[in-house]
Amino acid sequence: MSNQNVNNHASRTVMTMAITATFASLGFGYDTGVINGALPFMAEPDQLNLTPALEGMVVSAICIGAAIGSALSGRLSDMIGRKPALTYLAVLFFCSSLGCALSINATMIIAFRFLLGMAVGSASTIVPAYLAEIATGNLRSSLVVLMELVIVSGQLLAYIVNAIIAINLGHDPHVWRYILALAAVPGILLFIGMFFNKESPRWLLSKGRASEAMDVLRLTNETEAKAIAEFNDIQDLLAEQSSQKKVTFKDFAEPWMKKVLLIGLGIAALQQATGVNTIMFYGSQILTKSGFSTDAALIGNIANGAISVGGTLLGFMLVRKLTRRRMLAVGLIGILFANTAIGTASNILEGSPMLPYVVLSLTVTFLFFQQTFVSPVTWVYMSEIFPLRMRGTALGITTFCLWTTNFLIQLVFPTLMSTFGLSHTFYIFSCIGILSILFTRFIMPETKGLSMEDIERKFRREFSN
């Protein structure tokens, strides 16, 4: 076999394993988008008869479940392995999706949405770890883009399926059950695919299973020499890590590290406080509130999903060129404009046939700035500001904060809409946006162009007093 054929075979092996694992990310995206189309139908009096408060609980249950799942799943996958963890995750996706579709009351669907959230949160932790550990150096950045792209593509797919089913079966009062039942499909695909995937070679080596790790590395590297070199690099790193003391929460009591953690928590909360997931979860309600019919709102949501996919691709190109603070500032200013314009248009154009189209164009504008500028830089920034020894623990804390902030916003959003209306609700997000811009301008340090070690030295020097 020629060298070119060997190279192609190794790359195809890694990409096949990665695509299989990202069926979990597809479930992540699909399940966060599917409720957008199901909620208007399940809320009807002859179905689950949901009040605005109950709507908030149904939608936000996935967020608190995700917060807990993301906090627990990393340790679980360390114990039993990435492959078994992803297999169990597939079962959880499947069972909780069917449970949601078969729910007979609000309590039941809230419980299953919580379990679905644990699957979503676990996917957000286990999948990137697995992708990073199976990838060779030249593919690692591509796999990060792949995971993010699959998540937003899952949301877009959910919006398309929502519209198709609602338009064709909207006369059936149980249409929401069909919409939710299809969310089980990514779980089935993940379960089947994991029978063929290999375990992470890094996890295998960490458990002393050297021969199995070497077998996987031979499949994912172009040559035997590269496989051996990577094998030795992993062993050297494991030996270095074993000599370091275990991280405890006392390590975060150091003044400089406390400030870095607070900045990370601020960035995590800021990413959700823009109101992005109110559009992803409640987009159809926002559009119907502005004047669209339910079917038209579901079709309009497809534009929101499409711009998210395009913005994600553009964002990963821009994050290499712009500074972290500039990228975040541009995104937040654009979002502030969109939120304020939605609030203003809802006042000025109330009752006008133009209002729903204006609101749709502004939600698309919002998501362009969010997915292009804010979301990509958030994950890059949070992954690079913490010292290596504390990175896993610190990222777990900040991710928990992100999901908890998401939970609180989704919980209260329907009540805000019913109490204050569309206009004033988005004015509230505008006020939060101003605070976010001030945080970026005066508190967030720049890290662009610095190595991980230089970032740690900079923070130690500037935050020690």
Image: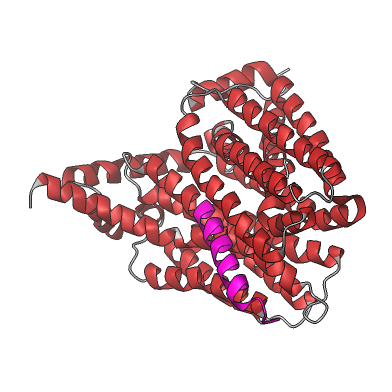
- Examine the rendering and report whether any part of residue 209 can be seen: no
- Answer left or right for 68 relative to 162: right
Residue 90: give x, y in percent of width and height: 50, 70
Q: Quadrant of residue 177?
A: bottom right
Residue 174: give x, y in percent of width and height: 68, 81
Query: What segment carries the magenta color?
Result: 151-173
Q: Quadrant of residue 105?
A: bottom right
Query: Would you say residue 171 sits in the magenta stretch?
Result: yes
Q: Which SS type dominates the magenta stretch? A: helix
- Answer left or right for 5 relative to 387: left
Count all numbered tags in the image, as a single digit.
0
- Examine the rendering and report whether any part of residue 230 can be seen: yes
* Residue 207 vertical position relative to residue 260 in the rendered view, above or below: below
Observer-nearest residue: 27 or 1? 27
* Residue 358 vertical position relative to residue 71 in the rendered view, above or below: above
Residue 431: give x, y in percent of width and height: 83, 34
Residue 306: give x, y in percent of width and height: 53, 50
Observer-nearest residue: 300 or 455? 300
How was the colour assigned to the protein in this rendering? secondary structure
Quarter of the picture containing the C terminus is top right
- Answer left or right for 225 relative to 76: left
Query: Would you say residue 243 sits in the magenta stretch?
Result: no
Residue at the limit of the structure toward the left, as seen here: 1
Residue at the limit of the structure toward the right, as seen here: 419
Rendered residue at 68%/42% (across/down): 362
Observer-nearest residue: 442 or 326? 326
Observer-nearest residue: 307 or 234? 307
